[in-house]
Image (spheres, helix red, strand yellow):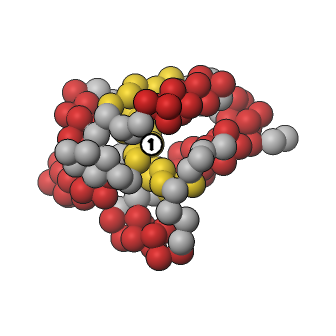
Amino acid sequence: MDGTQAANSGPKLKVLVAEDNLINQRLAINMLGALGHTGVIVGDGEKALKCLAKLKFDVVLMDVMMPVMDGLAAVAAIRAKEQTEGGHTRIIMATAHTESEEKAKFKRAGADGYVAKPIEIEQLSAELNRVMAIR
């Protein structure tokens, strides 16, 4: 069974997509739809925080480089809020920077996962499945 089939057989997820690039927004939403999931788009980290305060999501797909508030700052704010309020928001970082130092930086910031841009549907499916298994 490939990653796409595995994701389609699992639970349907509600995903917050924090991405400033219109083309990448559309690609992410289309991939999520093809995997049987739904997505809500915001254009920066600050809007992601506001959206998370109002709505519940299973996972956040967070671009690293965005205007107003970048992805790493947004992850830090989410994790700081969790320290006082509890809970755990699953976060997958999306970036073109694939060096191991970058991946380590995302992990230190509190991200649960990582996908390289350009995102491929099999990679997204596998990472969604992996982070959803985290308790």
The x and y percentages for residue 5 are: 77, 34
Residue at 48% in and 68% down: 103
The answer to whether 6 appears left or right of 132 in the picture is: right
The x and y percentages for residue 97 are: 50, 63
Q: Is residue 55 visible?
A: yes
Residue at 22% in and 48% down: 69
Query: Eyeballing the image, is 31 above or below 130?
Result: above
Q: Secondary structure at mark 1?
A: strand
* Residue at which label 1 appears: 61
Residue situated furthest right in the rendering: 1
The x and y percentages for residue 49 are: 23, 40
Residue at 81% in and 42% down: 2
Residue at 71% in and 30% down: 9
How busy is the neighbourhood of tag 1: few (under 14 within 10 Å), some, or many (20 plus)? many
- Amino acid of disc 1: Leu
The x and y percentages for residue 29 are: 52, 27
The answer to whether 110 appears left or right of 86 in the picture is: right
Query: Eyeballing the image, is 38 above or below 111?
Result: above
Image quadrant occupied by the N terminus: top right
The answer to whether 40 appears left or right of 131 in the picture is: left
Toward which corner of the image does residue 34 lie, by quadrant?
A: top right
Of residues 30 and 87, the one drawn nearer to the viewer in this rendering: 30
Q: Is residue 79 visible?
A: no
